[in-house]
Image (cartoon, rainbow, N blue to C red):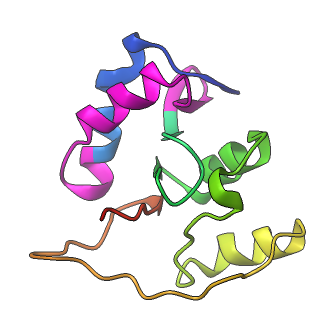
Amino acid sequence: MVRTATLADIDICNKLCFQVHGHVRHLELLDAIEQQTLTVVEHNGNITGYTTVLGFDGHAVAHSNQDLKALLGAVTAISESEFLLPTRNTELLRWCLEKGLHVVRPMTLMSMGLYNEPAGAFLPSIIY
């Protein structure tokens, strides 16, 4: 089930982000709640993924590609008509292509400082 998140979901989303990335994004989650764009996916009554907004200015975190597919399948709009998808996630990339999405702008994922490989499925954001 995919639904709009509430303030009560923030702690669970932070825990999920910490499990995948090793840090939380509390302020971004609060902003998404305020803008009513934070969306969560539930499996067996547990939140297993979320997206702040689908697009360059948002990010998504999930336990699995199945959770990301549920979020992507339920979205009604994509900010700026583009989102970032690491091509090394070939399963999700193939699924997106099968659903009619197109590669528009190949980019390289870069990070300032220490980078830890995420331990789960994710869609990154661009931070200027």
Residue 69: percent from the left, percent from the top? 70, 53
Q: Is residue 65 above or below residue 25?
A: below
Residue at the (28%, 73%) spot, across then down: 117
Residue at the (73%, 82%) spot, across then down: 103
Write the start and end of the magenta stretch as one range.
18-47
Residue 119: percent from the left, percent from the top? 34, 62
Q: Is residue 41 above or below residue 36?
A: below
103 displayed left or right of 111 = right
Q: Nearer the viewer, residue 95 or 128?
A: 128
Residue at the (16%, 76%) spot, across then down: 112
Residue 89: percent from the left, percent from the top? 56, 77
Q: Is residue 45 magenta?
A: yes
Q: Nearer the viewer, residue 103 or 116?
A: 103
Q: Nearer the viewer, residue 68 or 55?
A: 55
Specify the quadrant of the image occupied by residue 3. Answer: top right
Residue 44: percent from the left, percent from the top? 61, 25
Quadrant where the C terminus sits is bottom left
88 displayed left or right of 79 = left
